[in-house]
Amino acid sequence: MTETTTPTKSMDDIMALCKRRGFVYQASEIYGGINGFWDYGPLGAMLKKNLRDAWWTDCVMTGCNGKLGPDGKPVRLVPVDTCIIQNPKVWEASGHVAGFNDPMVDCRESKSRYRADHLKLLRATGEDEGRMFAFIEGDTKGFETALKKLGKYVKRDLGEGDTEVLELVGVDAEVLERVVGPHASETGTLTEPRAFNLMFKTYIGATATEDDVAYLRPETAQGIFTNFKNVVDTMRVKVPFGIAQIGKAFRNEVTPRNFTFRSREFEQMEIEFFCHADDAEAWYAFWRDWRMEWWQSLGLDGDNLILREHDRDELAHYAKEGAGTSDVEYRFPFTAPGFGELEGVAHRTEFDLRQHQEHAKTKLEYFDHERGEIAPNGQPKGERYLPHVIEPSAGLDRGVLAILCEAYTRDESRPSPELMKFHPRLAPIKAGVFPLVKKDGMPEKAAQLHAELSKRFGAHGLIETDEKQSIGKRYARMDEAGCPYCFTIDGETLTDQTVTVRDRDTGSQERIGIDKVPDYLDGKLGL
């Protein structure tokens, strides 16, 4: 991983701006909120829509922006929109009912709950029977606290080589009696790990019983797999092709945290791309590289974005030996200097289609007319097979959060130091139109330009207009909202039909003809 000397941004500052300017609110805030759920305000809803639309346009509608696949042909994708609640047998086949569990540990003293595989134990070297202090993996402050407590316990300063770190998973109850939890003061307060199912359970029917149990989907992918045969039968698609979907998913996270990064309700942007097993490696490399390029094209560039290939011991249950998995990762303020997953690109092999074929007892094999042995007439006889799947799966909410974190900028030289440097394509407010003063016909001229720009660009973002306060304060408000360009109607406009254009990032200004404004903005936004 590449280390960076760039100062870490304050997550508290970012969250404060998100609340103040209407990007993200705590869900049910007037009732004290509900942990793990977030609402998007006016600007956040538009930012999320713009990111969603960019993915939909670039991936689905234009086939990776017209980029040719490894076979030299255009990439073909078709959309679906599947239900949040599916037949429960879907989740039995996918392995979620039996295996979608996290090992959890509770602390009787602090009432906190932890992922068992995230807890580490710190002890003094050679102290096999001594006290151990637990900390959360990756939590630097937590480790320092554990080290300080351990030093007091052994009554000496601890240096390099004086301590060792152990895994909590696998220790027996006798060892747990000597462990001090991350937020506890006494030993023996941690319970033994136990499974915790992450799926939200619900019931179907007004008088439902336990026989009518169903689940809110924990991922959108399975709705694609169960509709594979329907899509092949009803659309003129040939392998290789992809099925894409954007939709809500729900996971009953035990410890939702880090703002919208780990929530209980979230939105996914997923593609299941079906190809022949012989071509899977090439298609995996294609999607891995193109998805990284796509995030970079939206402003997530530089040291904060990396592409990380999974180690063998990280592979999911559906991945066979040799099947690749990569993550596009972003350095969030709460993960720095490390990274958090933004999107995963996985070679799922034929696992999912095979599971559903076996459980549903329905043939899901694809008949490929262009493969197989060559017949006497010189044409291939065809081949029947279960396609392999390459899955680029992105978190829409995590994408919005990464865009917010990347855009947040402080410039102390400005009267109002906070601004959001959104890529113009994603900016929720595309332009501001301001009369310099509220007289001399300037408001009327501004209203005309505002109406024209709203009609042309309204589908992609807001066009703001405002007559109140000084022009400097209006510019500052637009900077905080991430508006890339402001057009000001002043005295010169009334004489020579020109306006002042102000650039958000540089603060520089230039004059252009008022009739040139729509085309000027169109060229800058890159829509």
Image (cartoon, grey):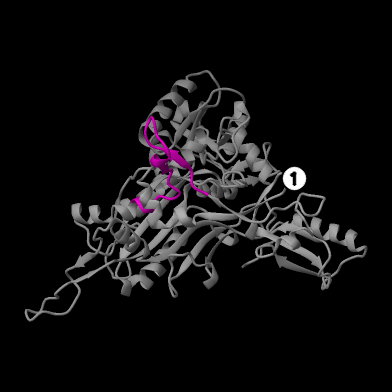
> Which image quadrant: the N terminus?
bottom right
Which residue is found at the position 75% from the left and 55% from the top? 142
Percent x, y of residue 466: 53, 25
Q: Amino acid at mark 1?
A: Ser
**Is residue 217 in the magenta section?**
yes
Front residue (pair 321, 455)? 321
Quarter where residue 351 is shown: bottom left
| For residue 523, above or below residue 455 | below
Quarter where residue 393 is shown: bottom left
| Residue highlighted by disc 1 | 110
Side (left or right) of 406 relative to 349: right
| For residue 259, above or below residue 231 | above
Front residue (pair 396, 312)? 312
Percent x, y of residue 112: 69, 46
| For residue 356, above or below residue 403 | below
Q: Could you say whether the residue bearing mark 1 is in a helix, strand or loop?
A: loop
Percent x, y of residue 6: 68, 58
Which region shows up in magenta?
198-223
Which residue is found at the position 16% from the left and 69% from the top? 369
Quarter where residue 281 is shown: bottom left
Crowd band around label 1 with a 10 angstrom C-alpha radius: few (<14), some (14–19), many (20+): some
Side (left or right) of 63 relative to 470: left
Total count of labels: 1
Q: Is residue 19 visible?
A: yes
**Is residue 76 in the magenta section?**
no
| For residue 414, above or below residue 63 | above
Front residue (pair 271, 443)? 271
Which residue is found at the position 61% from the left and 41% from the top? 419
Which residue is found at the position 42% from the left and 59% from the top? 392
Percent x, y of residue 367: 20, 66
Q: Residue furthest left?
A: 377
